[in-house]
């Protein structure tokens, strides 16, 4: 019997598919393992110290006995500065970490014990009594964490007032709540004044004219507190260069309107000359009319716009207050005649002598608003002589001020166990101004290009070449001849339950990556994370998809994304292992798509354009929401005692970090991710969103190339991945066809 054999090229390729697919699988797995090894080696080389005892090439290393694990110890002495030395012993070569009591996921320092088992590093701790830090052995995790003995810190107070001219001779600063701050001059003058720190950690003092006349001073400050008895007095602060000006300025020149003139039209223009930088106020019958700041050239100008001055002969004057808050005498009154008009605001009766209206020397007087009553306000009292017009506030500095509150226990740990205590989550996020400063955005844009060249492009080459050949198929345990209709495709849980479970899992993973503790402030943090994850999924995924469905007349379908949940778990693991801060977290756990009335999704119907538009809307929304949260986070005050402010900051930090972390994964053009749908519709749009999104993530997470975020290992890992992907593409596209011919 004759056997016919098909020798066409297509039959030869079909016969080789089984063996070829296996070879490709083996090669791809091997090369992927190589890439993973390069990644781990890069991280290890970045984190591990170099062993100086490495044997010379060609010589076999001499076996050494492994040192038995030794429980680590830590000692921290009392300090009068914010930075101090922590020392102790541990297993030789052990890597050690001192945990941050305010942010358990962060470190105060990381070091390695030397060959003798000794170690030391510098830590920064806020002021307070009986503080404790925890030491952890990262090499032998079986060893228990060790707490230091209680120690106390009373650091030097700080100045908030900027160097230069002291307005009203007022000096402000920050210190340990309840402490007594002594501000003293250095050099020829030895004058000093005492202030009391409020419960919010702020202090303010007005320098008395008797001890601090006009002149230039270099001020320093130190503080004492009975709440920190182990440290009697803090170290001295850095000097603050101040200039005090108590000389009252001369009267300004009122050029127009000229004395004896007649005014027939309004608004009236006032102008003249004065001391540059001073604020000039004009008066009509002792009532303030308008204000102007004297320009550098010495001229000023303002108008009576908004006021209708009544007819009659009026007295016009002007007075000025200089940049230091000193009030000068008014000009000699000029008699001006106003022609008949219907007034809308009648100035009150003239007072004996018009004077400026200082409310506080530290702030310029506001221009009075137009009045409809006959009396725009009481005639202000003239500034007091001698102190340069010091306004209300502390006394002249002859004694401590009483803040009226009770002395707290410990700064930095105060209210740590309350709802209003700070958790430190998001405190390392740069503000928008810091992100735009320097060259951060330039190298961040370079990271975006690296993402396109080393991740997106090689991945699409490999995915196109493989063409689904490595797709895994579920094994049927009920028999290979069982009809397809016999399978039960009913999901184990409803879509709504799946979405809820995915969100709960994502919230738990974010909280685990951030680090929580058994204190009330971390309950608030957990609630803020939950709100942030829900807001991110709602505004970043659900809302844009719903709006696109309204536009196309299609329905909305939600489900949990198993890919994103796995990626979130991996990000949490990497964050905990490497101690990353800010933490790399993922918060988008919902996959949203549109469905036709017959139940077909966009993917099933092959609607490439609509699928691409929906994907672009989702990726763009996640980018905008994350960026807006970052900007808003930088505008809120840090380390407040307000529950609402702290929870809002933590919620915004969650939206920002979880959104940008998710965006990187969503941009990957494979599988059912939005990046794949956008790649099929518009590659240019994908490239633009990827560059912008990765650049924003680079600025937020890494700050700049000098930060500790492992940018270099990630770049090496990207290079290794690109090599693997391109090699797979070359093998399938060129090498394999050549071997089959």
Image (spheres, rainbow, N blue to C red):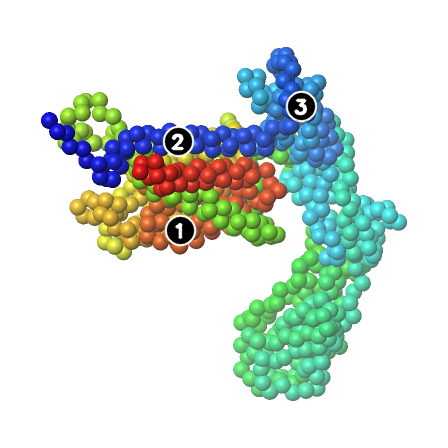
Secondary structure type for disc 1: helix
Q: Earlier in the sequence, mark 3 or mark 2?
A: 2
**Residue 55: image location, x then y, percent:** 66, 22
Q: Which residue is mark 1?
A: 686
In the picture, which quadrant includes the N terminus? top left
Report the residue that reaches farthest toward the front: 2
Q: Which residue is mark 3?
A: 56
Picture quadrant where residue 487 is located: top left
Residue occupying image coordinates x 47% and y 31%: 34
**Residue 635 seen in the current view:** no
Q: Is residue 611 above or below residue 338?
A: above
Q: Nearer the viewer, residue 80 or 566?
A: 566
Label 3 and label 2: CA atoms lie apart by 35 Å
Q: Label for residue 27?
A: 2
Kindly report which numbered mark, 2 or 1, lies closer to the viewer in this rendering: 2
User: Alpha-carbon neighbours of circle 1 within 10 Å: few (<14), some, or many (≥20)?
Assistant: many
The answer to whether the residue labelled 3 contacts the one labelled 2, judged by CB atoms less than 8 Å apart, is no
């Amino acid at each position: 019997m004759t056997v016919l054999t098909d020798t066409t090229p297509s039959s030869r390729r079909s016969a080789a598919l089984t063996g070829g697919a296996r070879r490709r699988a083996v090669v791809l797995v091997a090369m992927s393992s190589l890439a993973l090894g390069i990644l781990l080696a890069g991280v290890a080389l970045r984190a591990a110290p170099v062993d100086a005892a490495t044997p010379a090439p060609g010589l076999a290393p001499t076996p050494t006995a492994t040192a038995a694990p030794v429980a680590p110890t830590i000692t921290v002495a009392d300090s009068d500065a914010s930075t101090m030395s922590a020392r102790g012993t541990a297993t030789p070569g052990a890597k050690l970490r001192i945990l941050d009591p305010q942010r358990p996921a962060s470190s105060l320092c990381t070091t390695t014990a030397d060959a003798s088992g000794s170690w030391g590093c510098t830590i920064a701790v806020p002021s307070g009594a009986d503080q404790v830090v925890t030491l952890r052995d990262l090499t032998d995790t079986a060893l228990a964490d060790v707490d230091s003995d209680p120690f106390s810190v009373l650091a030097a107070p700080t100045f908030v007032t900027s160097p230069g001219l002291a307005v009203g001779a007022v000096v402000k600063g920050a210190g340990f709540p309840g402490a007594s701050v002594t501000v003293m001059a250095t050099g020829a003058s030895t004058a000093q004044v005492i202030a009391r720190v409020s419960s919010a950690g702020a202090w303010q003092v007005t320098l008395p004219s008797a001890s601090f006349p006009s002149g230039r001073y270099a001020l320093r400050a130190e503080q004492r507190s009975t709440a920190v008895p182990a440290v009697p007095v803090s170290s001295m602060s850095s000097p603050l260069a101040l200039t005090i000006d108590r000389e009252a300025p001369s009267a300004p020149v009122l050029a127009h309107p000229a004395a004896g003139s007649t005014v027939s039209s309004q608004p009236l223009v006032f102008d003249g000359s004065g001391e540059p930088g001073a604020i000039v106020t004009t008066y009509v019958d002792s009532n303030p009319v308008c204000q102007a700041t004297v320009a550098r050239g010495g001229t000023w100008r303002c108008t009576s716009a908004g006021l209708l001055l009544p007819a009659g002969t009026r007295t016009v004057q002007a007075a000025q207050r200089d940049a230091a808050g000193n009030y000068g005498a008014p000009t000699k009154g000029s008699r001006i005649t106003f022609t008949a008009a219907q007034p809308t605001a009648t100035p009150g009766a003239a007072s004996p002598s018009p004077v400026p209206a200082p409310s506080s020397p530290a702030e310029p007087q506001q221009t009075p608003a137009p009045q409809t009553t006959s009396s725009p306000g009481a005639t202000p009292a003239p500034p007091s002589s001698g102190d340069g017009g010091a306004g209300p506030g502390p006394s002249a500095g002859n004694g401590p001020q009483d803040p009226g509150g009770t002395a707290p226990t410990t700064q930095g740990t105060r209210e740590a166990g309350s709802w209003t205590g700070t958790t430190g989550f998001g405190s390392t996020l740069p503000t928008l101004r810091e992100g735009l400063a320097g060259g951060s955005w330039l190298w961040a844009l370079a990271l975006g290009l690296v993402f396109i060249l080393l991740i997106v492009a090689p991945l699409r080459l490999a995915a196109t070449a493989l063409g689904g050949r490595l797709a895994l198929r579920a094994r049927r345990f009920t028999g290979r001849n069982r009809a397809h209709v016999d399978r039960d495709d009913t999901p184990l849980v409803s879509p709504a339950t799946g979405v809820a479970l995915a969100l709960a899992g994502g919230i738990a993973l974010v909280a685990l990556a951030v680090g929580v503790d058994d204190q009330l402030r971390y309950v608030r943090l957990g609630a803020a994370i939950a709100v942030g994850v829900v807001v991110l999924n709602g505004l970043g995924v659900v809302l844009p998809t719903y709006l696109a469905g309204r536009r196309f007349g299609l329905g909305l379908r939600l489900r949990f994304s198993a890919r994103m949940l796995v990626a979130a778990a991996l990000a949490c693991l990497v964050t905990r292992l490497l101690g990353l801060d800010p933490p790399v977290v993922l918060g988008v756990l919902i996959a949203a798509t549109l469905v036709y009335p017959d139940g077909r999704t966009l993917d099933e119907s092959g609607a490439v354009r609509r699928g691409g538009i929906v994907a672009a809307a989702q990726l763009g929304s996640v980018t905008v929401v994350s960026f807006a949260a970052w900007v808003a986070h930088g505008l809120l005050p840090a380390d407040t005692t307000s529950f609402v402010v702290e929870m809002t900051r933590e919620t915004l930090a969650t939206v920002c970090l979880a959104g940008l972390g998710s965006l990187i994964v969503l941009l990957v053009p494979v599988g059912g991710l939005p990046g794949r749908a956008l790649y099929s519709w518009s590659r240019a749009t994908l490239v633009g969103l990827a560059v912008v999104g990765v650049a924003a993530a680079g600025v937020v997470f890494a700050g700049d190339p000098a930060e500790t975020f492992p940018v270099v290992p990630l770049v090496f890992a990207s290079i290794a991945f690109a090599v693997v992907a391109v090699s797979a593409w070359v093998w399938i596209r060129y090498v394999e066809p050549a071997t089959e011919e």
